[in-house]
Image (cartoon, grey):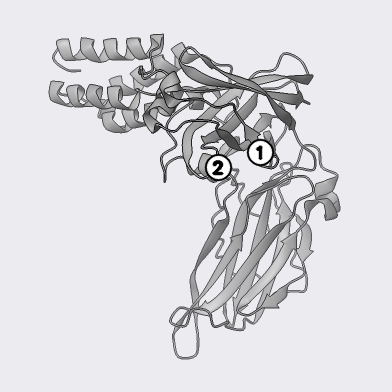
């Protein structure tokens, strides 16, 4: 087991229940590492180059059913093995105080602080990769940068890729490469290579080379079910120098979960419950992520991130619960607007692991009017939290570990 310091364990514990229940997070895949092995001179269409498989974070492990008690036991085991040495009473007391602080809110619904939880507040943010890789005749550094304007391409959508090659001391001024191309590749798990799905036509706009990715227009992607792991690859050559920039992304030919609309909302046990009418297409564990905003949709108030386990397919109600204290602390009255609905459905036996889904924020999903004082200001309370606190107290009373 990977060893952590106590402080890191506790800081991570706020999200441990969700992570344990649904390790396949609906967050952007990791950008794969740029390869720097020099290829043969570039051809109009590069042959598929073997590359180590670098799967997204979302595919690192399978989803397991909710089991908060076993999750707690695992976290306690982490604490028991901190660096293989005893922890001082003083450190345990500090850690307990920190744990109490981060566990005021449950891991599945917390205040939507600016700068926190970017995978929820910016669920389809651009992905980028770049660095200096060459020099000109006067030994001045030349860099290349690749940006994809979204990491998930939904049904009927396209994404725009932008490639720039500039001198570092002269940003905005294009440097003409010896060769440059953009292509889409997909992962072949049998051969463990990335075959070419499509080479993308480039258009120049100032210092930028641009291309559009339309998965529906790429036969091998449009026909795949479920969608394979895919990446955008930029290859740039300047004289004897070259650079490959790969960015992993996701796409969907059809929605894995269809959110039809709002089906009501209410105060329940001091928290806000929002019912959504959804069309469940796959009888599989489904991650649901969203953010509750003010009526204008400009101020984030609370997040939601929890798996939903359907027992049947078809139209049904999916209930999201935003923790009462997060709304009470924000002091913002309703109506509230639900935005950033997205997530993924686990695809059992599928190499890529998930089918991603999202819902556009138009038409808006609005709740009824509420006063923030209608929600409870009580901190989160649960059996696993009580057990964790009791474990800390036991260790402190024993004089440390």
For the residues labelled 2 and 1, the Cα–Cα distance comes to: 9 Å
Q: Secondary structure at mark 2?
A: loop
Please count the marks in the image: 2
Q: Secondary structure at mark 1?
A: loop
Q: Horizontal and vertical percent for residue 158?
A: 74, 55
Residue 364 disc label:
1
Q: Which sits in the foreground, 328 or 61? A: 328
Are circles 2 and 1 on residues that touch, CB within 8 Å?
A: yes
Residue at 74% x, 20% y: name it. Answer: 283
Residue 151 disc label:
none
Extreme residue toward the bottom, this view: 138
Q: Horizontal and vertical percent for residue 125?
A: 57, 51
Residue that numbered label 2 is attached to: 297
Q: Which sits in the foreground, 327 or 291? A: 327
Report the side of 135 relative to 84 (left or right).
right
User: Residue 83, can we see it?
Assistant: yes
């Amino acid at each position: 087991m990977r060893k952590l310091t106590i402080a890191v364990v506790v800081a991570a514990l706020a999200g441990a229940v969700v992570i344990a229940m649904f390790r396949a997070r609906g967050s952007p895949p990791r950008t794969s590492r740029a390869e720097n092995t020099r290829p043969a001179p570039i051809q109009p269409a590069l042959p598929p180059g073997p590359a180590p498989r670098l799967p997204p974070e979302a595919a690192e492990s399978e989803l397991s059913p909710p089991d908060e008690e076993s999750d707690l036991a695992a976290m306690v085991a982490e604490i028991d093995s901190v660096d293989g040495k005893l922890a001082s009473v003083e450190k345990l007391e500090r850690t307990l105080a920190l744990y109490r602080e981060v566990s005021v809110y449950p891991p599945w619904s917390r205040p939507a602080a600016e700068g926190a939880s970017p995978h929820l507040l910016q669920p389809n943010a651009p992905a980028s990769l770049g660095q200096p890789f060459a020099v000109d005749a006067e030994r001045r550094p030349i860099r290349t940068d690749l940006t994809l304007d979204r990491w998930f391409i939904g049904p009927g959508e396209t994404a725009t890729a932008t490639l720039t090659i500039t001198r570092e001391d002269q940003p905005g001024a294009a440097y003409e490469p010896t060769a440059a191309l953009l292509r889409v590749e997909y992962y072949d798990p049998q051969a463990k290579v990335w075959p070419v799905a499509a080479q993308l036509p480039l258009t120049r706009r100032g210092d930028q080379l641009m291309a559009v990715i339309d998965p529906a227009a790429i036969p091998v992607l449009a026909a795949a079910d479920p969608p394979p792991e895919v990446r955008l690859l930029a290859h740039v050559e300047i004289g004897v120098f070259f650079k490959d920039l790969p960015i992993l992304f996701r796409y969907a030919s059809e929605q894995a979960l269809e959110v039809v609309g709002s089906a009501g909302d209410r105060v329940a046990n001091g928290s806000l419950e929002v019912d959504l009418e959804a069309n469940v297409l796959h009888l599989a564990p489904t991650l649901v992520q969203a953010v509750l905003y003010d009526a204008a949709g400009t101020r984030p108030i609370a997040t939601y991130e929890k798996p939903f386990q359907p027992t049947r397919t078809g139209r049904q109600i999916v209930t999201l619960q935003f923790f009462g204290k997060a709304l009470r602390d924000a002091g913002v009255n309703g109506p509230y607007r639900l935005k950033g609905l997205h997530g993924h459905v686990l695809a059992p036996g599928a190499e890529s692991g998930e089918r991603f889904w999202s819902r556009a924020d138009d038409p808006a999903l609005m709740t009824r009017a509420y006063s923030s004082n209608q929600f409870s200001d009580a901190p989160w309370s649960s059996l696993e939290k009580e057990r964790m606190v009791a474990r800390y107290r036991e260790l402190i009373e024993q004089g440390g570990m």
